[in-house]
Amino acid sequence: FDEFKYGNGQMAFEYIDVVTGTILDILESKDTRTIKDHFCSRYSQNQRNQVKTITTDMNASYVSFIPELFPNADIIIDRFHIVQLVNRAMNKTRVKVMNRLRTSNGEDQKKYRRLKRFWKKLLKKESELSYTTYQYFPMFGQRLESAIVSEMLAYDPELKATYTMYQAILKAVEHNDSKQLRTVLDQPASPELSGYMKTSLKTLSAHFPPIQNTFYYPYNNGKIEGINNKIKVLNRVAYGYGNFIHYKNRIILHFNLKPIRNKIKMIEKEREHTAA
């Protein structure tokens, strides 16, 4: 399940086969009533009972109605959205601390510029930082990558506490360890932890059962995210669509005819080879 924007900020709902990537249908609206009416009218209860898994993001409305429509399906919250959630919380914390250092004090100004320039270092996985190779970094000089991260974290206790929590969640996801993630979420939050990260932890705790499923199943939202990127390109090339039905038909034609075009090319190549 996912959605994409079209028209004047309106959101369309789409669902695909997670294995093949085939678009099953696209609805003009993503509101709960429209989606429920669609599935109830198009698929019988027996058909819906056969659905085993549904992969989605942390959209609360989807999670609330899926058990009603698909009683036997396990909900899988895509791990990309787990990482994205804490990544944004970490970056917002960095910006908050950075702006706090934007003063007339020369030392604070130096810290501000460092946090602004090397923001990607703070979002990088700790395991991917270099601990052995010295490099030249502007505003730092010849240093280890891990050393400049440690120095920036020392600027503010809120930044350091949030970074520690951020890395703990990334490590649990990277190691595919749901127990480790549960332990991280259950431990008492540090009083120095930023409000952004505390909110993210509450969201993860509220969605933990479907999040846990992402560690057991091989499915993710990769195919549908790729489809959405192509849909945005179709919309941009056409300078938008005034009629949703035309837009939907254009999307379906593009994705359904692609295998046929490839097949035609293969037939043409075989003919050229035979003729030669």
Image: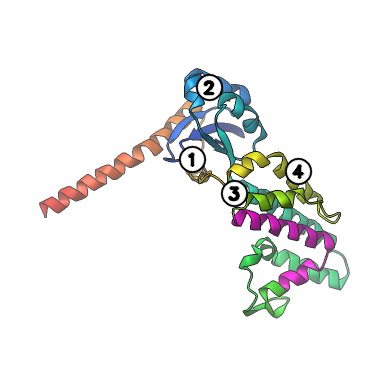
Query: Can you identify the residue that label 4 sits on?
Result: 202
Q: Earlier in the sequence, mark 4 or mark 1?
A: 4
Near mark 1 (Cα within 10 A), the count class, few <14, some 14-19 or many ≥20, is many
Q: Position of residue 75 (x, y in %)?
A: 58, 36
Q: Amino acid at mark 1?
A: Ile
Tell me the residue that label 2 is attached to: 38
- The quarter of the image holding the N terminus is top right
In x, y percent, where is residue 241?
A: 50, 33
Name the residue tied to disc 3.
80
Q: Are marks 3 and 4 in contact (CB under 8 Å)?
A: no
Which secondary structure, mark 2?
helix
Q: Residue at x 21, y 50 (%)?
A: 269
Marks 2 and 3, Cα distance to the nearest angstrom? 28 Å
Looking at the image, do the residues carrying marks 1 and 2 touch, with CB atoms under 8 Å apart? no
The span shown in magenta is 148-175
Frontmost of labels 3 and 4 is 4
Residue 109 seen in render: yes
Check residue 231 in the rendering and tell me which mark sits there, or answer none. 1
The chief SS type of the magenta part is helix
Lateral position of residue 117 relative to residue 221, left or right: right
For marks 4 and 1, give the CA distance.
33 Å
* Foreground disc of the pair 1, 3: 3
Three-letter code, disc 4: Lys
